[in-house]
Image: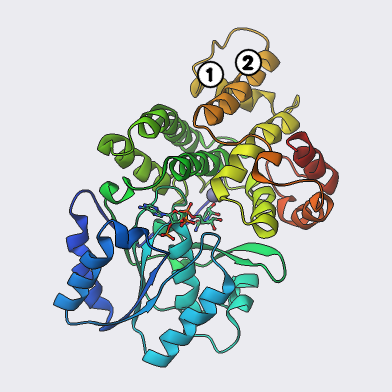
Amino acid sequence: MNNFHYNVPTEIFFGKGAIENLNQIAHYGKRVLLVCGKDSIKKMGLYDEVVRILEQLDMDFFELSGVDPNPRIESVRQGSVLCKKHGVDVVLAVGGGSVIDCAKVVAAAALYEGDAWELVLDPKMIVDALPVVSVLTLAATGSEMNGSAVITNFETREKIGAYSTLLKPKFSIMDPVYTFTVSRAMTAAGVADIMSHTLENYFTPVKGAYVQARFCESLLKTCIHYGPIVIEDLSNYEARANLMWAGTLAINGICSLGQQTGWSVHPLQHQLGAYYDITHGVGLAILTPPWMRYVLSDETVGKFVEFGVNVWGLNPDGDPYDIANRAIDKTEAFFMSLDLPMTLSEVGIDDQYLEEMAKNCEFRTLKGYVPLTYRDSMAIYEAVL
Ligand code: NZQ
Ligand code: ZN
């Protein structure tokens, strides 16, 4: 296990009625920028609830609404202008990962003189940020308890994750009931995203981080257990609650620190997001099985056996490659059982930009579990055309 420093100062208020804790926002000032997506929070009544609390606290609030999935840098710029113009003290994100990510970079850009995109390209330039508070409505990204924000610039065809400890929310409200309205398809994509974060941490060349590996396995088993249940019954509280907490734990450091390595499938997927604006979790579900098959080798087969035995319950006796391949097949079959697409053509992607995308992600995947070159990325994309 490698050395690490762990510090997540985000307070979590979890469960039914947790929204009442939003009144803690008053500790951070009087002027709030409320960041939200299109209309989901209005339809479910959460918007009214948030406004009620802000009004009770006698807070002034301004709004950045309509933040898109795969949040655009244009929204961030708009938000930072609002913050500067109105002297905003605290940024409140109410929505899924896209809304929270957008709010985080808005919070940093509000205290930065240059263009917000510079902060995404080089997050070391984030030296200060307004406090961020979140109310999560979709279990997937873990943005509610980490310092990452993924922003897309469609002009330059870049989708980039920026990280700074200054972007970690001060507190997050997590009421699983708010996720009941997430569609079947988005719920499945969320499960795939949680599993992908966990797998990116699980498949590491670092030895001896036993406890992190067992954490990963329990999160994967949680997704495998509750994914099908929630797809059949979108209002199942137990399933929604477990998935929501698994989503947070998969990417708040518990599973990665001490065994950190570069990620592989996410950089490949971020290219799809930048070029085709597809749903993040869908791209991950498509790319995960071919990535696994591609990196399976004498060096990695042992880890795949561990995955097959501990996560999928396969019999440890037998040919390691057979166990590894069955584990990969089971992973693929699981995604299919959630009705997730399994090929790029199903989401409208052909070979037009494959070479460009493979070149772009080469430099971002160099330090992955198995380093991927341009040729490797091409082979993985082509395997699922
Ligand atoms: O716009 P609204 O109306 O809010 O609708 C959204 C959106 O259409 C809808 N939705 C959210 N909560 C809902 C709901 N619909 C009904 N009921 C609810 N309760 O769902 C759609 C997708 O929302 P989005 O926020 O885009 O989804 P998600 O949470 O999966 O976020 C995806 C983004 O996060 C980034 C991804 O790249 C992508 O841009 N990621 C962020 C990470 C991080 N910060 O650590 C890590 C991840 O790997 C990921 O890259
Ligand atoms: Zn992800």
Q: Amino acid at mark 1?
A: Val
Q: Quadrant of residue 42?
A: bottom left
Residue 291 position in % (x across, y down): 70, 36
Asked whether mark 2 lies closer than 8 Å to ligand 2, one says no
Please determine whether, in this image, residue 182 is positioned above or below residue 212: below
35 vs 316, nearest the viewer: 35
Seen in the image, is 104 located left or right of residue 57?
right
Secondary structure at badge 2 equals helix
Residue 276 position in % (x across, y down): 67, 55
Q: Which mark is residue 323?
A: 2
Which residue is at 56% across, 29% downward?
Answer: 336
Q: Quadrant of the C terminus?
A: top right
164 vs 330, nearest the viewer: 330
Secondary structure at badge 1 equals helix
- Name the residue beneath numbered marker 1: 309
Whether residues under marks 2 and 1 lie with C-beta atoms below 8 angstroms apart, the answer is: yes
Please determine whether, in this image, residue 260 is positioned above or below residue 41: above
Q: Quadrant of the N terminus?
A: top right
Seen in the image, is 240 located left or right of residue 167?
left
Between marks 2 and 1, how big is the CA–CA gap?
8 Å
